[in-house]
Amino acid sequence: MRILLAATLVLTAFGCGNGGGVPVNILEVTNASAITGEVSWQSSGLLGTDLFPATGTEAIAGCEVYRRGFGEGHNVVRISANSNSLVLNLLATSSTATNWYVVIDANGTITQVDQSSNTERPCHHESPAAS
């Protein structure tokens, strides 16, 4: 019975720590280049500590928009394309939803910006209408 209670407490703690709940904070990366970029992260672990942190790496396809949600806590995010990179220290709270926006331009330069690019196809250019 004690083992079951201990296991339940551990699982509950993992569920309540960062990464276990519904993400309330969004990172959006608009890749306006044909280059495949990469995002890697390390988030606070169990109960906001360094114990069992959440880590990962994902590709950001060229000419696409990438979005990832983060739960409450401290998140270190590295965005890279070619030899360029940008490291962000993001503090996410549960009381206020926060969005962070980053753009990889056509040359692979990475910049944090104030608002969304509002485009789902960043490299898609409409052809001019025929006259």
Image (tube, helix red, strand yellow):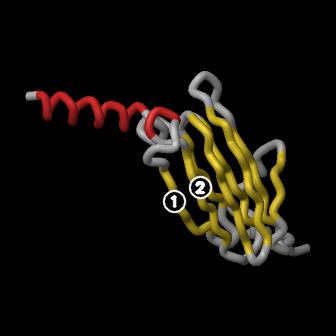
The residue nearer to you, when weighing 59 against 115, is 59
User: What amino acid is at disc 1?
Assistant: Gly
Residue 33 horizontal/vertical position (percent) = 76, 72
Relative placement, left or right, of 34 versus 53 is: right
Q: Are marks 1 and 2 in contact (CB under 8 Å)?
A: yes
User: What amino acid is at disc 2?
Assistant: Trp
Disc 2 element: strand
Residue at the disc numbered 1: 56
Residue 45 against residue 31 in the figure, above or below = above
Please tell me how crowded label 1 is: few (under 14), some (14-19), or many (20+) other residues with Cα within 10 Å. few
Residue at the disc numbered 2: 41
Residue 87 horizontal/vertical position (percent) = 74, 56
The residue nearer to you, when weighing 43 against 64, is 43
Residue 53 horizontal/vertical position (percent) = 48, 48
Please tell me how crowded label 2 is: few (under 14), some (14-19), or many (20+) other residues with Cα within 10 Å. some
Considering every residue shown, the one lying at the far top of the view is 95
Residue drawn at x 77%, y 76% is 83
The N terminus sits in image quarter: top left
Residue 67 horizontal/vertical position (percent) = 60, 52
Q: Is residue 39 visible?
A: yes
Numbered badge on residue 46: none
Query: Upstream in the sequence, badge 1 or badge 2?
Result: 2
Residue drawn at x 81%, y 63% is 110
